[in-house]
Image: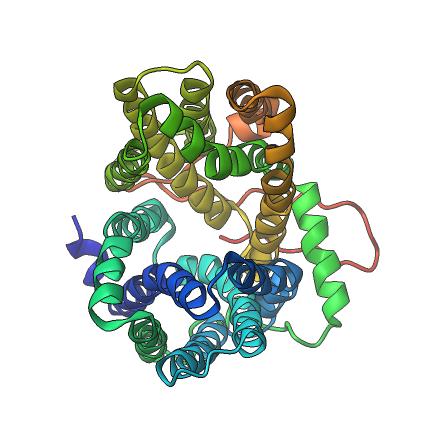
Amino acid sequence: MLSSLLRQSDFRWFFAGRLVSLLGSSMAPVALAFAVLNASGGSRDLGIVLAAHMVPLLVFLLVGGATADRVSRRTVLIAANLGSGLTQGMVAALLLSGHYSLLAVSVLEFLSGLLAAFTTPALRGLVPELVEGSDLQRANSLLATVANGIKVFGPSICGVLVVAAGSGTAIACDALSYLLAAACLARLPATCGEAAVAGAGRSPLLRDLREGWAVFRGTAWIWPVTLSFCVVNLVQTGTWQVLGPQLTEQLSGEAMWGFVLSARGVGMLLMSTVMYRLAVRYLARFGQLASVLGALPLFALGMRLGAPLLVAVAFAAGLGSAAAATAWDTSLQEHIPDGVLSRVAAYDDLLSYIAIPIGQLSVGPLAQRFGGFHVATAAALCYAGVALLPLASPALRRLPHTFPGRPTPPAAQAQTIEDPEIPAVPPRG
């Protein structure tokens, strides 16, 4: 399964970098939460630290996407990993030396979030430069398998490390993982990414952002999915994170929530493995249909279903989530031109995630007004309906997919809104 892709030296080093980086990143949330709670004695500081990381990630995501299209994505990723290693190393030093400061940790987490805004678009844009078009689905599936496997086992490993060695040591391991990832990425050819950004970097940043927006809004199959998941994240994330543990405890006891999360993680891990070999002619359509499975756990909670059914639908939701993620990343990489891919991905990420804080803040008052079970049911119905809406677009339903054994289709034409100041973006071959 792995040999064909990992025999390619460039992808092998990229894969190794992602592996060590993800291992370290799986430790950071758990270790940071315990560290701040223990040092401050309350949840107020933790909320401030988490917000300090999230705000710059959202604010600078578009700048990160434009940067990844203007300069070598290899360079962006190496610099971001080195910077993240430095910031996390300084957080670890503060904790290990007993000099915790809310201001200092918040500033460092702000810088970490800023660097993450440059990392995500560059990662999505670099994969098509490392593998052939017909291997994109397998490459994304392999990367997702590793990511989902670490999600399942990483927090448990981190918990043991925190207990054995302390939160500061766990965060120091996270810092080291970033440095190792930078070393792996440095093994990629220095010319990696130069073709995609040839001629870029000379135009103003604002013009590059406008060009990315024109491609995003003018590509008929992208924006319906992005707007759909903006609403899905609005109704699902807060409901699942805030009400999920409470309602599960009422129905089946406190311990059941851990089993539900584990079942979802196992489903994601299994489907990301299956996607390595699954050949689907219309991959984007398949992924969008699979995403509807994510509504099932909310519906099960709202209908007060028993623990066995709740665990089963959580597993199904994990299957759907992994299928949708791999299908979407692959579709973007196959059909969006290299020179604008990171910017389009940044717009997609920003608009998909921007409503999450609203949902997280509003679900509590809504539950108090209407009852948690009713809110969960309404969220599930809204989720399922909105997730199906993009399938009304013929452009999405008929978007072709390349898989091994078939020739690569021409990249989908980016139907941009006419603007004399925005040059046409050539399709990627």
- Is 351 left, or right, of 255 in this rendering? right
Closer to us: 82 or 33: 33
Residue 401 x, y percent position in the rendering = 42, 37
Q: Residue at x 38, y 85 (%)?
A: 97
Can residue 28 be seen?
yes
Return the residue nearer the eye: 336 or 152. 152
Residue 424 falls in which quadrant of the image? bottom right
Provide residue 164's location: percent of width, then percent of height.
Answer: 20, 68
Report x, y in % for residue 184: 30, 75
* Total marks in image: 0
* 413 relative to 257 in the view: left or right: right
**Residue 406, placed above or below residue 20:** above
**Picture coordinates of residue 147 (x, y %)?**
31, 52
The extreme front residue here reads 41
Q: Is residue 227 left or right of residue 277?
A: right
Q: Give whichever of 277, 58 is nearer the camera.
A: 58
Identified at 51% across, 27% down, the residue is 398
- Above or below, comparing residue 173 to residue 405 in the picture: below
Tell me the colour scheme of the image: rainbow
In the image, taking residue 94 as reference, residue 103 lies left or right, namely: right
Residue 259 falls in image quadrant: top left
* Residue shown at the point (26%, 47%) measured from the top left: 152
Instruction: Confirm whether residue 413 shows in the render.
Output: no
- Answer above or below: position of 24 versus 419: below
Outermost residue toward the right in this view? 420
